[in-house]
Image (cartoon, rainbow, N blue to C red):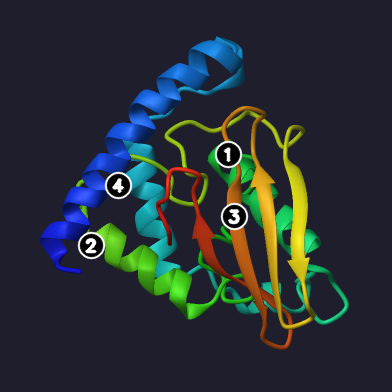
Amino acid sequence: MTNTQKAVIFSLFVIFIIFGSLFFYKKYISVDALPKGSQEQQKETENEALQNNGLRENEKENNINGKTKDPETVVKKYYENIIERLNGRTDVDLRLDLNYVTDKIVNNYRSLSESYPDGIGFDPFLCAQDYPNNTDRINLNEIKDDGVTAIVEVEIVEGWGPITVSLIDLDGWRINELECQQGFKM
């Protein structure tokens, strides 16, 4: 697939996200449920994640991700962290933490960020432009776990549609691919 084809597909995806977000926002989300965020804040967060790659030596010892934990636990902690960080309740950023994701996610995010130097315009981890104020509405549904690979569906807010999270066991479960309901993959 050429870069032009990728750009066209991504543009269509963004348009779909915008109209879909407006529809779901009006239908399912109250005005109070979503914080006001700025494009500058999103760009700053993207840059921080790319600079430190999300990996911190002092977190390795405290990381829940390991052989004893199931894929759902890893996915739940990952998405709780993303929402808590976006709401300013933690400085820890697990989005690109190699204890939680594979190099594939990191490389795909870097490529996506480089394609949009002024900011991506939506959160590719949440498959949305907006985010909830809390983690109370995260729902998980494990679809598959064969001990080597797993698939978990995540619904951040009822009505937003699921995010399909594929994991692989690399001496601990790691997120290897995210797929939005609209077809966008990272």
Q: CA distance from mark 1 to mark 2?
A: 25 Å
- Where is residue 134, by image quadrant? top right
Which x, y percent locates residue 157? 65, 31
Q: Nearer the viewer, mark 3 or mark 2?
A: 3
Q: CA distance from mark 1 to mark 3?
A: 26 Å
Q: Secondary structure at mark 4?
A: loop
- Residue 167 vs residue 47: left or right? right
| Above or below, 115 relative to 88 | below
Q: Which residue is mark 1?
A: 88
Which x, y percent locates residue 40? 31, 38
Q: Residue furthest right?
A: 68
Which x, y percent locates residue 117? 19, 53
Mark 1 / mark 3, whichever is N-terminal: 1
Frontmost residue, 31 versus 179: 179
Q: Secondary structure at mark 2?
A: helix
Q: Which residue is mark 2?
A: 114
Q: Which residue is mark 3?
A: 164
